[in-house]
Amino acid sequence: MFDEELLKNVKRFTPSKTQITKTEKALQQVDFGRINAKPQKSYYAEYITIIKQHLPKYKRQYYGYYNAEGHACLFINLFIENREEAPNRVPSWLTDFRWAYDGGTAYWSVYYDLKAQKFYQFGHNGEG
């Protein structure tokens, strides 16, 4: 899941449209059940299927950073959220980080190493 200290203590960058497009293509193909070394607990195992089925519906926030090896990586925050926004204003999710400590499959995240073309640290929230 989200590691606030990781993103505070590293060199950051703004991902390009090309990097995001390539990441989105990879996201469509990834087997979420194989990203982490530890398998999902049986109760949450179905979350992977639910997330994959609803993938187009998730809003995304991309945070670019360089890892210890100097690889450009992305932290991708995904969520399904319907908040009322003031008319004629930029939606707040485009300017403010979204995070929740429950919400099940509505909130999840994953990291992506752009050089290695590999996802890691897939995590979803539990149910509140």
Image: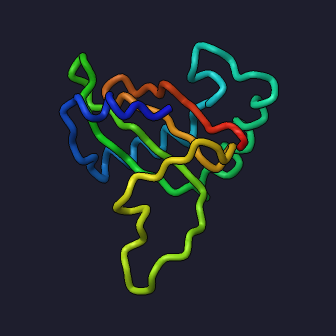
- Against 4, residue 94 (above or below) is below
Residue at the extreme top: 37
- Residue 18: x and y in percent read 31, 48
Residue in the image at 36% along x and 34% along y? 4
Residue at the extreme left: 11
Residue at the extreme right: 43
* Rendering colour mode: rainbow
Residue 48 vs residue 97: left or right?
A: right
Q: Is the C terminus in the top left, top right, bottom left or bottom right quadrant?
A: top right
- Residue 92: x and y in percent read 41, 67
Residue 105 vs residue 66: left or right?
A: right
Residue in the image at 43% along x and 62% along y? 93
- Residue 54: x and y in percent read 67, 52
Residue 93 vs residue 10: left or right?
A: right
- Residue 66: x and y in percent read 24, 29
Q: Nearer the viewer, residue 66 or 106?
A: 106
User: In the figure, residue 72 lies in which quadrant?
Assistant: top left
Q: Nearer the viewer, residue 29 or 106?
A: 106
User: In the figure, residue 44 lies in which quadrant?
Assistant: top right
Residue in the image at 78% along x and 35% along y? 46
Residue in the image at 49% along x and 38% along y? 26
Q: How many marks?
A: 0
Residue 116 vs residue 105: left or right?
A: left
- Against 117, residue 54 (above or below) is below
